[in-house]
Image: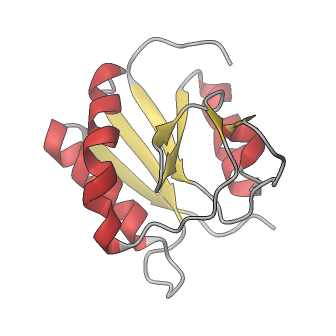
Amino acid sequence: MPKRPAGPIFVTYSSKTKRKDKGLLKALERYDSPRIRQIAAAAADLGLNFRILSGRFGLLAPEDKVPYYDHLLKWEGVGQVLAKVAARLVREKVSAVVYFTRPLRKASAPLAYHALMEAACAEKGIRMIGIEVERPA
C-alpha cells in the first residue's frame, strides 16, 4: 500500500483470529478479520491511511510485518503500549483518528483497546472519533 500524506487515519483493533504461518507476515495478512479488511478497504477508497491497533506492537501499518502471537490487551497493559502508540501518531503527523470498534456496551467489547487509542490521542492533542460497528455478516 503506497504511503499517503499525513492527515486523518482510520484505525481498528487487531483480532484474536490470526494466520498461524511461521515467520513474519504483513499485518493485513496476519489478522484474519472481515472487520479489518473492510475498514482497510474503506480507508483505501477514501485515500486515507489505515492502522491496526495491536495490544503488543502498538499501531501497525497494513504492510508492517508481525510474527504470530496470542495476546489480548488488558487494562493493566495499556500503559506499556501507550507511549509507542502516541509516538507513532506524532511521527506520522496524524491530525485525527477515526476509530472503529465493536459496540462498547457489549460485554465482549475491546474496552482496553478503545481506552488505549483514546489516551494516546488525548496525550498528543489529536481528535478521535469513535464509530461502533457490528460484526460483518
Pick the residue in front: 70 or 89: 70
Residue 27 horizontal side relative to residue 54, left or right: right
Furthest residue toward front: 23
Q: Position of residue 38 (x, y in %)?
A: 72, 46
Give the total number of marks visible in the rendering.
0
Q: Position of residue 94 (x, y in %)?
A: 33, 26
* Relative vertical location of residue 35 with respect to residue 2 in this rendering, above or below: below
The image quarter containing residue 97 is: top left
Pick the residue in front: 8 or 17: 17
Residue sitting at x 75%, y 64% = 136
Q: Position of residue 34 (x, y in %)?
A: 77, 55
Q: Position of residue 123 (x, y in %)?
A: 15, 44
Residue 102 horizontal side relative to residue 84, left or right: right
Residue 49 horizontal side relative to residue 85, left or right: right
* Relative vertical location of residue 127 with respect to residue 4 in this rendering, above or below: below
Furthest residue toward bottom: 107
Pick the residue in front: 43 or 1: 1
Q: Quadrant of the C terminus?
A: bottom right
Residue sitting at x 68%, y 27% = 45
